[in-house]
Amino acid sequence: MRRYGKHTDEDDVRVRPNRKGNRPRTSIRPKHEDAAEGMVLTVDRGRLTCLVEDRVILAMKARELGRKAAVVGDRVHLVGDLSGKKDTLARIVRISERTSVLRRTADDDDPYERVVVANADQLAIVTALADPEPRPRLIDRCLVAAYDGGLEPLLVLTKSDLAPPDKLLDLYGALGVPYVVTSRAELENGDAADRVHEHLDGKITAFVGHSGVGKTTLVNALVPQDRRRTTGHVNAVTGRGRHTTTSALALPLIGAEDGPGDGWLVDTPGVRSFGLAHIDPSRVIHAFPDLEPGTEGCPRACSHDEQDCALDEWVAEGHADPARLYSLRRLLATRERHEGD
């Protein structure tokens, strides 16, 4: 058997080619300093629609980002074909740091956290006063997620022609959450859209609500130049609506000739549950600012759901609505059951 040394001069030595290429691998990645900045408008099966200046670009995520995913509202940096022409595809190479994040899980037993919207300024919680009946517990959960994620809440109450808003407003009056009450007639003549629009100017607002509350109808009234699919009917037996919005989408709050810059509306799919598995139970109290002063007399590391909790006496003295304490403890009990699984 013939053996070759390190410095052989034989010309019949065969070198096996590298099937992965002859270029040496490196961990140094390009900096993409010339990448253009854009905003993610929607995500669909791995393809992201982004706005770069005044052009709508279709893009994909670069491999170097790993498992980090971009969501609606993210500020991203793109390279590649940025013309926006048909059948072109850009590449997202960086995702900027987020100023706020709206997260949810499917339920409190689901460990998978879903980021719904990034960089939103406020969360508009759309709730019908009747048909279907309001769900205060879902509102509470949305408020917890909003405060925890750095968003300001806004209550939008629809269908006031079917039921008065007084009872629901009394329940949340102590929170100081801004609200707008609308009727179906006001949605049709545009008055409701004008009053809601006052709270949205210059902001990025995520709209959330369970099916059948009229969220899509309201969105269509606010953004008539880009109407979403019409609202489904409410089931007379279950009181639930049919999902008509299947993916989150950012829409510009503009007139046809005004150009962008007055704010953004992010329409999200209707929800039937709003899990809080991703939220630390100790932070839930921050979503109840009407109860927080009463925790000053609590023992150290109080869970606010035990015998020595000072909130019982605080509420009994009339400082807060007992229904609010019940709502807090119901959320805490749900989270504790999840932690114990």
Image (cartoon, grey):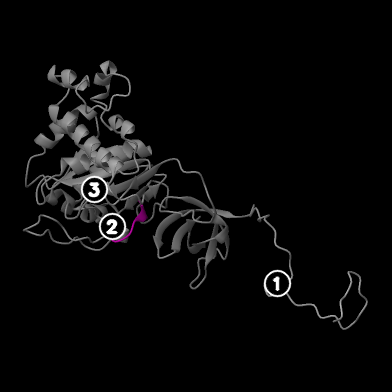
- Given the image, on which type of amino acid does mark 1 rest? Gly
For residue 82, what is the image quadrant?
bottom right
Q: Which residue has dot 3 on it?
A: 193
Mark 1 or 3: the one toward you: 1
User: Residue lying furthest bottom in this view?
Assistant: 12
Residue 274 locus on image (x, y percent): 26, 47
Q: What residue is drawn where x is 27% and y is 39%?
A: 335
User: Of residues 333 and 244, which is closer to you in this image?
Assistant: 333
Magenta residues, as a range?
246-253
Residue 40 lies, in percent from the top left, at 44, 55
Counting residues from the start of the chain, the first of labels 1 and 2 encountered is 1
Query: Does residue 47 show up?
Result: yes
Residue pictured at 21% horizontal, 26% vertical = 306
Q: Nearer the viewer, mark 1 or mark 2?
A: 1
* Residue bearing the label numbered 1: 21
- Decide: is 183 above or below 61: above
| Residue at 36% in and 54% down | 251
Q: Quick one: label 2, few (<14), some, or many (20+) residues within 10 Å?
A: some
Q: Earlier in the sequence, mark 3 or mark 2?
A: 3
Mark 1–mark 3 Cα distance, whole angstroms, equals 60 Å
Counting residues from the start of the chain, the first of labels 1 and 3 encountered is 1
Residue underneath mark 2: 224
Q: Which mark is residue 318?
A: none
Q: CA distance from mark 3 to mark 2?
A: 10 Å
Q: Nearer the viewer, residue 340 or 277?
A: 340
Place residue 243 in its image quadrant.
bottom left
Q: Pick out the residue farthest to the front.
A: 1
